[in-house]
Structure formats: structure tokens, C-alpha cells
Amino acid sequence: MNLLSLFRRNNSAPVARERLQVLLAHERAFVGKSDLLAVLQEEIIAVIAKHVTIERDKVQITLDRGDPVSTLEIDVEIPSAAATKARRREPSMSAVAS
Amino acid sequence: MATVLVVTSGKGGVGKTTSTAALGAALAQSGQNVVVVDFDVGLRNLDLVMGAERRVVFDLINVVQGDAKLPQALIRDKRIDTLSLLPASQTRDKDALTAEGVERVIGELRERFDWVICDSPAGIERGATLAMRHADAAVVVTNPEVSSVRDSDRIIGMLDSKTAKAEKGERIEKHLLLTRYDPVRATRGEMLKTEDVLEILSIPLLGIIPESEEVLRSSNLGTPVTLGNPNSPAGRAYFEAARRLKGETLVVTVPAERKSIMGRLFGRRAVA
């Protein structure tokens, strides 16, 4: 800890302000509409499920609502065709929406 | 021409009822005919803050459902004769409020008073939407704190879409009342500043009510702060806000405690 961090310790207001600005920009855009990212997530998984059998609990979804871009990362584990139960992990698929 | 004003916030505990009582009493002291209406059905508290809890006979629900006439339910304040209270029901639930009934009661109140101030319940459910439904103007009570600002933003969106005025394509007048503000902590960067909240919510500022012991003291006593201690910082801030509601243009300041020299030297308050 240096002298500067002593002064900076309590400066949480700017963080609050920035978090609110980002959050509210999203909430205002999606009022009354379905969330674009949620729709994308559902549809992308539906497309994959059409071609391969995927288990819902093998799908990892991370969402980061940010400024200026948001990222939706969908990580789907697709079981290999081999008779063994060993599972191969496919490269993750990411969709980016602004 | 009466003005129907809703005092709302989304979040609970930010000071809607306190502000309704203080603004109502301030307007009434300036000679205006004022009624404060409690829309928090099932959890009424405006009667308590106004010091009229022992005088409630009929309530808003009785009038909405036609079981009592409006004059029977109105409680005239004992200290200011231009101030009245229409209490909420403590035993019924919010479903007892009907849209048509509320519209009729607000219409009747408009004929009798200059100001109809509706104290909204927290949340965005039926009670809150009906409280704002017929408003001409809104006071959005906000604390300089993230969850309060977020909820206020949501409420501002509802004021612009769910009110009778908005549905007619008219704009409802919105005012920000920043409560529980601590200028010292804001300067230190520990609390959102007035400018931060204004920039985020982008509605005009009605006033800044400093965090004050007088506010709790007032509700303990059942006396609106503008009546019990008009010269306290919070009292002065509410009086100025009331003047702005009437259309006066005043520079917004944060009223400070008037401290003696000894108070300045030893006046560090303990934080509970």
C-alpha cells in the first residue's frame, strides 16, 4: 500500500457512476422488448441442437454487458461420435452483439 | 386548476412518505389547499408521519368502493387548516383499488384542492401504477446510491409510458428530489454526486435534502419537518423544493447545518 492508495481507497462513487451508466444504457434499450442477447442465445443453441444432440448442462453461457460492445459467449460441449464415453471439447463458439 | 403530483421512487425506504408530508405541509403553509393521499394500501404510513394515525375512520378504499363519501374520509390537519390527508386502508390489499374508482376519487379531489399529492407505494405493481396514473407531475425521490438510481430510472420510464398523460401523447413533468445526501461524503468521492445522478437520470432537479437527524425526529413526533423544524437544513430544502413546484426559479443549494464554533470544533457526529 502506498500513499496514493490511501487517498484512493474511498473513491467508489466514480465506479458506481460508471456501472450505472452501462447498466441503464442496456435496460433502457430493452424496455418492453425481449433481450437481443437472450434471443440470440436461444436461437444459436436451437441451431446446434438441430444437428447434434447436446445436453443443456454441457452448455456454458457467459454474458458481459459492456460499453461499447457486449459479448455473449456460448461454450457447447459436443460429444464425440466414438463409442467411448470420452468427450472431446470443441472450440468455443462466440457471438458478439453490440 | 389543481395539480396532481405523484411522489414515487420504485425503491422503498428512500423517503417518499417523508417527502410527501414535508412538501404537502410546505405548500399548505404558503396558503395552498393541499391533500396528501396515501396509496400504500395494506402498509399505510402517511397517517403516522403526519401525526394523524389516531384519527383515521374511513380510507381511500372506502371512498373508491363507495362505502364512504370523500368528505367523511378526509382528515383535516390540526395545525394547518389548508392541509388534509386521505389515508390508505390498513386491512385491505391493493386489488381493492380499481382504476375507475381511483379516477373518480382523483377527479373529486381536483375540484376541492390546489394540490393532490399521491404518496406511491414502493415497487412497480398496481398500487404504484395507480398512484401515478392521473398525475400531471411527478417527484422522483432518489438516494445517491446505485440501486435507488436504477429503480428511479425504471420509474421514469413508466411515467413516460404508463400514465394517462403519456398515453394521450402529453409529457408528464418530472422532478428529481435527491434525499439523504451527504455533501461531505460526495466531495470525498464516497457517494454519487448530484451531477452524477442528474446526468444519469436526466430530469430536472427539484431539490437536495441533506441527510439530517431532524428528519427522523420529525417522523418520531408525527410532525412534517417543514412544520416542526422549518429552519433545519432539511426543512429549508423542502421549503425551497415546494417553491420550485409552484414555478419559482431558485438556485439549488445543499442547506448546511448552522454550527456554532464549539460545534465546529467538536461536532464530528458518530456514525451508527
Image (cartoon, rainbow, N blue to C red):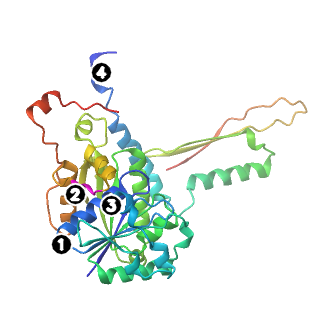
Going by the image, does A35 lie left or right of B239?
right
Task: Report in which chain the residue with disc 3 lies.
Answer: B
Q: What residue does disc 3 label?
A: B50
Q: Amino acid type of disc 1?
A: Gly
In magenta, the rendered stretch is B223-228
CA distance separating discs 2 and 3: 11 Å
CA distance separating discs 2 and 4: 41 Å
How many badges with numbers are in the image? Answer: 4
CA distance separating discs 1 and 4: 53 Å
Q: Nearer the viewer, mark 3 or mark 4?
A: 3
Q: Amino acid type of disc 2?
A: Thr
Residue B181 part of the magenta segment: no
Q: Position of residue B14 (x, y in %)?
A: 38, 51
| Label 4 secondary element | helix
**Can you say whether A63 is above or below B161 in the image?**
above
Q: What residue does disc 1 label?
A: B31
Residue B271 figure quarter: top left
Q: Position of residue B73 (x, y in %)?
A: 41, 75
Residue A11 figure quarter: top left
Q: Main secondary structure of the magenta part?
A: helix
| Label 1 secondary element | loop
Q: Position of residue B88 (x, y in %)?
A: 45, 67
Instruction: Name the residue at the right extreme.
Output: A83
Q: Which mark is residue B226?
A: 2
CA distance separating discs 3 and 1: 18 Å
